[in-house]
Image: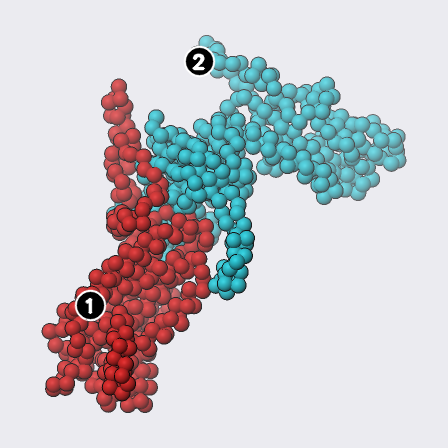
Amino acid sequence: MPHQERGAAAPAVATRTIGPAVGAGEAPLEDQPLERVNQPVSFWRGFVPTVRDIWAYRELLGQLIRKELKVKYKDSVLGFVWTLLRPLLYLLVYAVAIGVFLGSGKVIPQFGIYLFTGLLAWTLFTDIIGGCTGSIVGNAGLVKKVYFPRELFPLSVVGAALVNVLLQAVILILAYMVTWSFPSPGNLGLIPLALLALIFFSVGLGLILAASNVFLRDVTHLVEVGLLLWFWMTPIVYDWTKVRTTLTVDNDLAWLFQVYLANPMANIVLAFQRALWPGGQTEAGAAFYYDGNLYLRLGVLIAAGLVFVWVAQRLFARSQGNFAQEL
Amino acid sequence: MTDVIRVHDVSKQFALRKDKSLKERLVNARRSRENAEAFWALRDIDLTFASGSTTGLIGHNGSGKSTLLKIIGGILTPSSGYVERRGRLAALLELGAGFHGDLTGRENVYLNAAILGLTRKQTDGYFDEIVDFSGIENFIDTQVKFYSSGMYVRLAFAVAVHVDPEILLVDEVLSVGDEPFQRKCLDRIRRFQREGRTIVFVSHGLDQVRQLCDRAVLLDHGNQLVDGTPTEAVRAFRDLNQAVEEADEEKNVDLAAQGTRRVTISDVSVADLDGRPVRTLPSGAGLQVRFRVDPGSRLDDWIVGVALEDSGGQVVWGANSDMQGFSLPELTGAPEEVTVEFPEVPLSEGVYQVSIAVASTGNKTVYHRVNRLATFRVVTDAYEDGAVHLRPGYRVGDQAVPRGGVPLESAAGER
């Protein structure tokens, strides 16, 4: 008799193959286990199930990224050109103010490209951090009405930022063409490592900021100020050797220089410059780029970044149950 | 029958915090606890939903209906207790929650479908059907911000019903769009029912609950008051409302009155045929509407109008003495008691309100009109839709079909 029942239910079930493929998929309803909604998981073990959950929703993540990209420049005449115009404007300002007026352009060869490689990494970082911070609050309507892993909001920001950085890289390639100087392929291996480190680090930070912004709106403003400070703590518009000279030669503060170099963004930017800045090697003998062991440094950063993402996700998961009621 | 959702002793407490910025938090750090006002949105809710059932959640605004849906949907986490469920779930808590005004209808369909759990390929397959259901083919490539609110909601609902969930949570979204579209939506819900899906829905349309649900739960201030048949729950809810309405009635006397006050109406009451005041009567029983008129001086040209309205404000019956061929006797100037007697009131179950007017013939001058002053309730044990209570018989060929179960009259007469 129960067998009979199953047979009758089967056709109805077979047509229902829709929805995020979480759980048992096509098994008849009575065979699916009762699952506890929002099962409290211990702080230590919740990461892997969340990652699996996010993977199940990857299609939605793609849609959300597409939305971010489409919405940003919808109805603007120049559209995606704005993605390129902003860093170009920065480039112009810094090149004139620092390169020409302050004379850095005479010291650092191919100052334009030098600036741009650093700005490339920095724009990616600020896009992710700034975007993530507002991602939950900005999507309050969705957070309050629909359930899917909340991590998708910050992650969609990351995806959109990555697409933007790829577009901006086109400018860099054009600059190579114009100046007809290319970076040596030997250091290009640093790029994937630096990108990975940057993504881990910024995703972790982004998750924490996104969650805390829900409870404390001051975070948005704090981030703005913090990023400005951070920008000048990172060798983007100036030369890292200046910092070394000032701290270790002029003053006896070698430890402070090590602290300076512990800044993850400094390492990432230095790696970008070493890999993508042709001016770093043209000078015979004297390397302008950072010649320390960047592979090791990035390796450590990636490992630390992974742990950081894990911790950040757990903190995020802890607070996300209250998002819907706080917004 | 398999249990699809189990709600175990769920309570939810909200903290209404008043300070939101860092400054306020720091300044009020010590008082922060006191500033957080606790408020129970749900208390000890214990429910089980079987597969294929349709349950309506009813209650006043703020009674916790939506909170319960959100907890079942996983959007909120309960303060204590937990929810178990199996099967794919779609929550329609707000139509077009994922819509973005800057995107076109087409883009929004894909985005919203993904939010509700469809893959891109599946959406491709359903796309024409979705557009067809929404009936806005011509605007599908227009940005959604230019849509009328009706179009917006149609498109959103069209997407929502094409997601194929095993559990459907619906929050007050069935009352959208124009009438043909509403009918389409209800047809879709009925199809879901036939396909054996489990539906939990919140509605303020009590008739809708009675039509669609096989069970209803009444919530009041976060407590589960009644869990039973829709008729039981709706009746209990109306009892709850009646108390509130009676309190309001007294306050509204002056507000509801109109007219020149040449004649005044007072002491409106509803009674049964024996003249005993009643609040509730079985359908088909008789009813008297009684009131006093005070003409002040002699008056020979006057008529009395009575209207009965249902809880939705729809007039279910209305006429005046003139229209019905009665000419009322001259008033001497002394107050007089007027009784309008209805030998039979075959209305369907619900709450009805009485409005009374005294005017000159042809309604040229309205002397006094009191709106919705008296309330009475009609109960039946019949399962029927519509405004009137009819008692049909059935005949197949030459043979009359006997009624199984309790005869209608005796069931109604018990009350």
The chain letter for the residue carrying disc 1 is A
- Residue nearest the viewer, comparing B401 with A119: A119
For the N terminus of chain B, the image quarter is top left
The chain letter for the residue carrying disc 2 is B
Q: Quadrant of residue A313?
A: bottom left
Q: Are marks 1 and 2 on the same chain?
A: no
Query: Residue A298 bears which disc, if any?
Result: 1
Note whether B300 is above or below A116 in the view shown: above
Q: Are marks 1 and 2 in contact (CB under 8 Å)?
A: no
x then y, percent, for residue A13: 27, 33
The amino acid pointed to by label 2 is Val
- Residue nearest the viewer, comparing B162 with A100: A100
x then y, percent, for residue A242: 26, 84
Instruction: Tell me which chain appears red.
Output: A
The amino acid pointed to by label 1 is Leu
Tell me what hue chain B is rendered in: cyan
Kindly identify the residue that appears in the image at 88 percent across and 35 percent down. Answer: B297
Asked whether the viewer can see residue A31, the reply is yes
Question: According to the image, label 2 marks what residue?
Answer: B396
Kindly identify the residue that appears in the image at 72 percent across and 34 percent down. Answer: B356
Q: Secondary structure at mark 1?
A: helix
x then y, percent, for residue B30: 52, 58
- Residue nearest the viewer, comparing A122 with B260: A122
Q: Secondary structure at mark 2?
A: strand
* B370 displayed left or right of B64: right
Q: Quadrant of residue A234?
A: bottom left
